[in-house]
Amino acid sequence: MRLFLRFLPVLSALFVLGLSLQAQAGVTLDQRTGFQIVRENDRPTSERPNWINRQDCFDSSNDRVASVTEAEDIADNSTDTWIHIFAQVTDWQTNSDQLDVYVSKSTDCAKEIEEGITGTSRCAQVYSQSKWVAGAPLVVNPRDIILLDVINDFDSSLPAGGGEDICDKQEEQSVSIYILQRRGDGVVGSASWTLSGYDLRGPSAPDTLEALPGDENLFLEWNIEAESEDSDTNGFTYYCVATGTEAGAGGAGSTPGTAGGAGGESSEFENCPQSILSQGVIPDEDFLDYKCGSTNGKNTRSGQAKDVINGTVYAVAVAAKDDLGNSGPLSPISCAQPGEVTTFFESYKDSGGKGGKNGKGFCGFAQEPHQGLLLWGLGLVGLLMARRRRSHS
């Protein structure tokens, strides 16, 4: 009994500390591993992998995830692009708690929801779950992030985004994502992620393009006016299409603000008619078959296109890309025909030149000098000697 009384103050302190810790329980999010955009091809750190780009949007589905089982299945098997949030939750009460995910451009959603402000476009709800399993991700559709202006009340029966048309939204926007642990009408815990957003807009196109022929390659030069250049430009991609190539049904690529290409309409150019490349079209995955080179660097203004065949006339275009991998629209079209390059000596011989031993090179002049060349050399030596005598006198 005396021993118990001796440790009673310590036990009381631990009990109070336990109550304090329980009162502070809620949601936490590891700022390194708690947020991840899972896509088929990972993007390097230099390309802002926690941002949604245009290709991510196209690679997303029209669905939402409303159950833990479905979330776990998607995490293990889906090839679509999804946002995975690994929240750490303490003091979870099974019969009363739920996890909600909100997204906003500028509003503190934790504060707004706690104060009972709902039904506004400042905070869009993109996920809700009444069950929580440790280690299971909260799975959010990237298209819901892009649609934050119009999504407020979560309804798992509604499709997200209304289709791929949302992916042609030419906009860049940083967002904050809030994970709320709600109990009844109150918020008992919250965490946020602020290092994300979406950027669906590629850089401006080059204003001019010139393609010059090479041997199984084309030399490209382009220019961008200073007032048109985008700060996030990170390189350029080249596209080469052989004359006469026709697009399949629906065309390839899309013009800014539209959902598809020209549907096979021919892009007529004087020397290289075809129906794939057209100025102002944004290249998509259908253009990969026509990619003929790329270069990195914002200030690059020239490059070399490969994978072209000598004797074939090509339509060529260049598109800038940004640091998320978004492509901008195509430049003006230039036409060029690669071909075998004739060297200077080959051109000289074809024109009737006879220099060189057995026609093998310039060095042959020293072994079989022409009489006129020898007389010219002797005259030059005499002139130099005469000038030297005059200078000494």
Image (cartoon, helix red, strand yellow):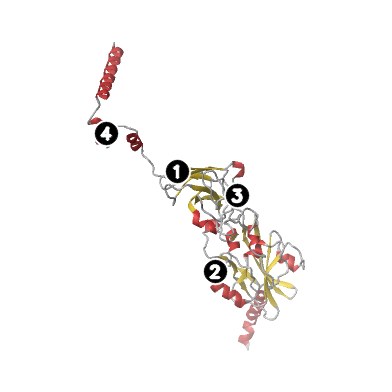
The first of marks 4 and 2 along the sequence is: 2
| Residue toward you, 187 or 156 | 156
Amino acid type at mark 1: Pro
**Residue that badge 4 annotates:** 356
Question: Hey, which residue is sitting farthest left in the picture?
Answer: 367
Residue 60 in view in this figure: yes
Badges 4 and 2: C-beta atoms under 8 Å apart?
Answer: no
- Which is nearer the N-term, disc 3 or disc 1? 1
Q: CA distance from mark 2 to mark 1?
A: 42 Å
Asked whether disc 2 touches disc 3, contact meaning CB atoms under 8 Å apart, the reply is: no
**Residues at discs 3 and 1 in contact (Cβ within 8 Å):** no
Q: Which of the two labelled residues, at mark 3 and mark 4, occupies the earlier sequence position?
A: 3
Q: Which residue is outermost to the top?
A: 393
Q: Which residue position holds label 3? A: 280
- Please tell me in which quadrant of the rendered image residue 198 appears: bottom right
Disc 4 to disc 2, C-alpha distance = 66 Å
Spot occupied by residue 114 in the image (x, y as percentages of width and height): 74, 68
Residue type at mark 2?
A: Thr
Q: Secondary structure at mark 4?
A: loop
Residue 218: x %, y % from top left: 45, 46
Which residue is disc 2 drawn over? 79
**Between residues 383 and 115, which one lies in front from this camera angle?**
383
Amino acid type shown at disc 3:
Gly
Q: Position of residue 201 (x, y in %)?
A: 61, 54
Measure the alpha-carbon separation of dots 2 and 3.
Answer: 31 Å
